[in-house]
Amino acid sequence: MSARAASPLHRTSPEVVLPELEVSVVLLEEEEEPPSYATASLPSITADVLAFLSEGDMAQEEVSQPEPPARKGPGVNTLLVGVDELLSLGDVSSALELLGKAEQFDPLEPRLEGARARCEQAQRIALEQRLGSMKQVPRLKLRMAELMKLSLDARMGFLLSRIDGHLSYEALFSVSGMSRMETMRVLVQLLEQDIITLAPR
């Protein structure tokens, strides 16, 4: 009995197993600590990174913010000089186009009103020269069936309905429902498209 009690297997077996279990527990606790430590420090790192990135975004926005567009092209003085030169050459259409650019460049320019009046006067003279005597009587050159095939706007259609071979240009100005200048423009268009002609005297 004394020999069995002194046997090393029965005395040392519990002591050998317990330390192994304790070591295993200690190792698991040490492995779990780094993740919890890293998780605790993550918000501060993320905040720093976000602050750095936000500063970079703000700087990028300041750099990429567009500057107010600068006016390009010739100034209003140059445009108005060009308008007068074109009028002297008889190119009223180009003068009006250039005048429109000048009005966009500086709508408050006081000289625009005078330039507009000169363009309208030159245009009126050109239209009157194209039409001839205001006492002349226009008449339809096409039949109604042929007119229906044309793509005419409302102004042309209404004026054509008033052209009966008896009313002169001057009379049409009164019944057209448009200004004298606009009526002349439409009549010139009808002449150029060979839709109307002049009645023989």
Image (cartoon, helix red, strand yellow):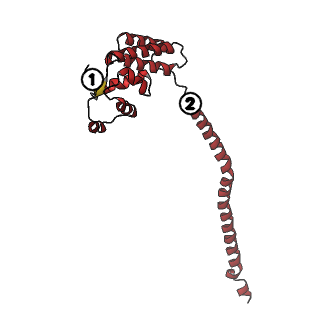
- Where residue 21 appears, x then y in whole percent? 68, 71
Residue 104 lies, in percent from the top left, at 49, 22
For badge 1, the amino acid type reads Ala
Dot 1 lies on which element? Answer: loop
**In the current view of this chain or complex, which residue is farthest to the bottom?**
1
Is 27 located above or below residue 2 in the figure? above
Residue tagged 1: 199
How far across and down, in percent of the image, does residue 157 sit?
36, 33
Q: Is residue 149 left or right of residue 116?
A: left
Between the C-alphas of marks 2 and 1, the distance is 71 Å
Side of 193 where 94 appears, left or right: right
Q: Nearer the viewer, residue 181 or 56?
A: 181
Q: Amino acid at mark 2?
A: Val
Quarter where residue 181 is shown? top left
Question: In terms of sequence position, does the residue under pointer 2 or pointer 1 come before the other?
Answer: 2
Q: Residue at x 61, y 35 (%)?
A: 58
Which residue has dot 2 on it?
A: 63
Mark 2, mark 1: which one is toward the viewer?
1
All told, the count of numbered labels is 2
Question: In the rendering, at what x and y percent does residue 170 appear?
Answer: 38, 20
Q: Quadrant of the C terminus?
A: top left
Question: Foreground: 123 or 38?
Answer: 123
